[in-house]
Every structure is written in structure tokens, then in C-alpha cells.
Image: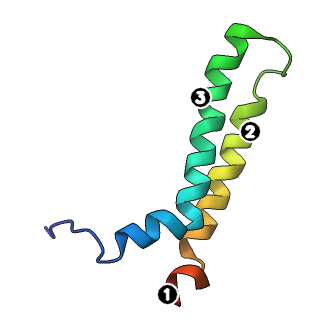
Amino acid sequence: MKKLTLLTDWKLILRKAWSVRLNVVATVFSVAEVVLPVYSDAFPRGTFAILSAVTVMGSLWARVVRQKSIHDA
């Protein structure tokens, strides 16, 4: 089995990769889905779960697309 190692440019990837940014947004939506109903019923159930799912799908797409901000740096 191969050993996992960090990429040499991991700091650049964390700062510039859209897949990382979208995963952070998806995490915020997931937390909002759990926390907001405790304080308010202003949003229909499942709103943030759907937003989170769409964001994760975007993140998967961003993971395989060449991103100039990373590859040209």
C-alpha cells in the first residue's frame, strides 16, 4: 500500500483551490441546516441541505478542472 504524502504546494492549494473554498461553503450550509431551526423557522426544512449538496457537486467539478490560479503559479 502506498503511503499518503502532502503535495509540495499544499499551502497554495489550500489558499487558491475552488474545491477547497466550495467545501468550506458546504460545511457552513451543513451547520446552518442543523443550527438555524433551533432559533428560527424562517427557512423551509432542507433548504441548506440542498444548498450543501449543490455546493459539494460544484466542489467535485472544481477538483478535476484545471485552475489557472494554481497551475500557473
- The answer to whether residue 28 is above or below residue 33 is below
Q: Please, what is the three-letter code of the amino acid marked with disc 3?
A: Val
In this picture, residue 47 sits left or right of residue 62 = right
Q: Can see residue 66?
A: no
Q: Residue at x 60, y 60 (%)?
A: 59
**Outermost residue, bottom direction?**
72
Q: Determine whether label 2 and label 3 are within 8 Å by CB.
A: no
Task: Name the N-terminal-most of marks 1 and 2.
Answer: 2
Question: Which element carries disc 1, helix, strand or loop?
Answer: loop
Taking the spot 38% from the left edge, 67% from the top edge, the residue there is 11
Does the rendering let one see residue 25? yes
Per the image, the residue denoted by label 2 is: 50
The residue where tag 3 is placed is 31
- Measured Cα–Cα span from mark 1 to mark 2: 34 Å
Residue 62 placement (x, y as % from top left): 61, 69
Give the Cα separation between the discs numbered 2 and 3. Answer: 13 Å
For the point 72% across and 9% down, the residue is 39
